[in-house]
């Protein structure tokens, strides 16, 4: 390997301010070299080597993600993304902008020195940048995990001076690079905290000490056993019923007859079923995410047992809108989305394969099969005009895209249906992809978007597939979609500042 820059280039001439700074930096370096921390000679060089090529941080990310909570997985992913950006910036800009030689090792005890000395320029420290980027990125999603990682990151940064491979200013500049990289990633992909909807309109809800009065139905098909056990430990007075998927609807009806608060643990389809029962019985709903995607719970701001228990114990909650569709004698509600056209076909195709190859592979396979099939677009009359449509999507609330992040809802009680349509025509795959990338733009050659409180679709052929909250059924002809403003009361933790 050869140096990334020519270290033989003469240094610039003397400058009083620069000379003073370099002298101070040298004295700090020598002061660290003269100190002997208990165990430092044995631990810090090993720690420094373990951070080579980000190995330490990839291992830390794996350990954090292994906790199997959504927040921890996001923290691990954000930490690695921040590290990647920091490494790219250091290697392409930082190392090539300041041609600073490494410190002389005369004052550094031999026992501390690394067996393989780095040959790139000294400024700034890439190890410090990676450590700060990873720790800052993790802390942005999970302060608890950030606090656990921060001492290790600080020790790695210190080890670079302690082993004699960097001046203190190299480490400080590298750490600043790393923190800036984490904030840059946050600008592109907002944290979950930035995407929380406002805690409004607030609802008066009973505070359930120990969970007394809560009857929760958990869908065993969603793999909720761990969360159910955690809930039972946190709320010992709550009644928890574990049901097979086919029995969930019946158990929800039974639970509603004796519950003060109806609870549900499962994916979006299970939560939809519980919401129908809660609306019919006039009960507040407590949602514990337990499925693959959990759009409603996450948009609501409930991610885990701890968040839900806090809301239940304190009686914290809000009122949210509900979407409703009717087609002939058939009707239903949706908390997330309603759609006609290609998407319901994709959902049905995915269901055929998910139990064999898993959810994400099944989704990819379904998309390929549906888009390659020889079919004609849906035809429906919208605003008095018959139009060919590849897809019609209606969201329960406005979906926003922030930076590169997927669309999320920032207000679950805005009174609006977020309607997107992909026009019929040739090349449906290209049209659908262009509409997806366009996001919330109001109009393009491939798609249009509008926000309304009610939508009527005439001329829809009976038997046309429709999807709502991941469930698929068939229409009975014309379809009406409307909003039920603030119809459902749900528990959610409120901000600490009131």
Image (tube, rainbow, N blue to C red):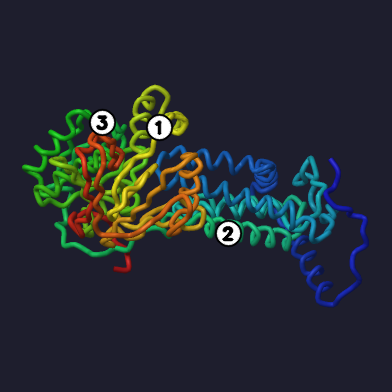
Nearer the camera: disc 3 or disc 1: 1
Q: Secondary structure at mark 2?
A: helix
Name which of mark 2 and mark 3 comes first in the sequence. Answer: 2
Placement of the N terminus among the 4 image quadrants = top right
Residue 445 marker: none
Q: Position of residue 304 (x, y in %)?
A: 33, 46
| Vertical order, 18 against 40 (above or below) | below
Q: Position of residue 172 (x, y in %)?
A: 68, 62
Residue 375 marker: 1
Residue 327 sits in quarter:
top left
Label 3, label 1: how many angstroms apart (C-alpha)?
A: 37 Å
What is the crowding at mark 1: few (fewer than 14 residues within 10 Å), some, or many (at least 20)? few
Residue denoted by label 3: 220
Q: Are marks 2 and 1 in contact (CB under 8 Å)?
A: no
- Identify the residue at horizontal 69%, vertical 55% (top origin): 89
- Kindly give the residue lying farthest to the front in the view shown: 385
What is the crowding at mark 3: few (fewer than 14 residues within 10 Å), some, or many (at least 20)? some
């Amino acid at each position: 390997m050869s140096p990334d820059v020519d270290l033989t280039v003469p240094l610039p001439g003397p400058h009083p301010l620069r000379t003073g700074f370099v002298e101070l930096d040298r004295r700090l370096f020598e002061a660290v070299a003269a100190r002997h921390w208990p165990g430092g000679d044995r631990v810090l060089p090993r720690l420094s080597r373990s951070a080579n090529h980000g190995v330490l941080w990839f291992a830390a990310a794996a350990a954090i993600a292994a906790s199997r909570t959504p927040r921890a997985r996001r923290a691990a992913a954000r930490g690695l993304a921040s590290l990647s950006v920091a490494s790219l910036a250091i290697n392409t800009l930082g190392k090539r902008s300041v041609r600073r030689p490494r410190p002389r090792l005369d004052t550094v005890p031999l026992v501390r020195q690394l067996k393989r000395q780095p040959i790139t320029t000294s400024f700034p420290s890439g190890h410090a940048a990676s450590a700060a980027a990873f720790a800052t990125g993790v802390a942005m999603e999970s302060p608890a995990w950030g606090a656990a990682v921060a001492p290790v990151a600080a020790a790695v940064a210190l080890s670079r001076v302690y082993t004699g491979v960097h001046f203190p200013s190299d480490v400080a500049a590298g750490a600043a690079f790393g923190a800036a990289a984490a904030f840059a990633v946050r600008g592109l992909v907002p944290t979950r905290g930035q995407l929380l909807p406002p805690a409004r309109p607030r609802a008066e809800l009973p505070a359930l000490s120990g969970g007394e009065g809560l009857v929760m139905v958990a869908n065993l098909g969603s793999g909720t056993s761990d969360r159910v056990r955690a809930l039972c430990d946190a709320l010992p007075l709550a009644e928890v019923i574990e049901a097979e998927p086919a029995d969930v609807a019946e158990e929800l009806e039974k639970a509603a007859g004796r519950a003060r608060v109806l609870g549900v643990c499962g994916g979006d389809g299970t939560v939809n079923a519980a919401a129908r029962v809660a609306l019919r019985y006039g009960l507040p709903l407590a949602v514990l995410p337990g499925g693959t995607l959990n759009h409603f719970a996450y948009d609501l701001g409930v991610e885990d047992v701890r968040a839900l228990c806090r809301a239940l114990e304190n009686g914290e909650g809000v009122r949210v809108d509900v979407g409703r569709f009717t087609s002939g004698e058939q009707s239903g509600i949706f908390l997330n989305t309603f759609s006609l056209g290609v998407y319901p076909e994709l959902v049905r195709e995915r269901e055929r394969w998910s139990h064999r190859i898993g959810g994400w592979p099944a989704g990819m396979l379904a998309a390929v099969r549906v888009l390659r099939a020889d079919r004609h677009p849906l035809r429906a009359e919208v605003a008095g005009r018959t139009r060919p449509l590849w897809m019609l999507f209606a969201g329960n609330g406005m979906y926003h895209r922030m930076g590169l992040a997927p669309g999320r809802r920032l207000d679950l009680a805005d009174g609006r249906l977020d309607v997107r349509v992909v026009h019929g025509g040739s090349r449906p795959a290209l049209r659908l992809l262009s509409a997806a990338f366009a996001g919330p733009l109001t109009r393009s050659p491939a798609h249009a978007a509008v926000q309304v409180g009610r939508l009527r679709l005439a001329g829809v052929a009976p038997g046309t597939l429709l999807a709502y909250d991941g469930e698929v059924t068939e229409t009975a002809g014309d379809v009406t979609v409307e909003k039920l403003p603030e119809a459902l009361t749900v528990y959610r933790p409120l901000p600490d500042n009131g």
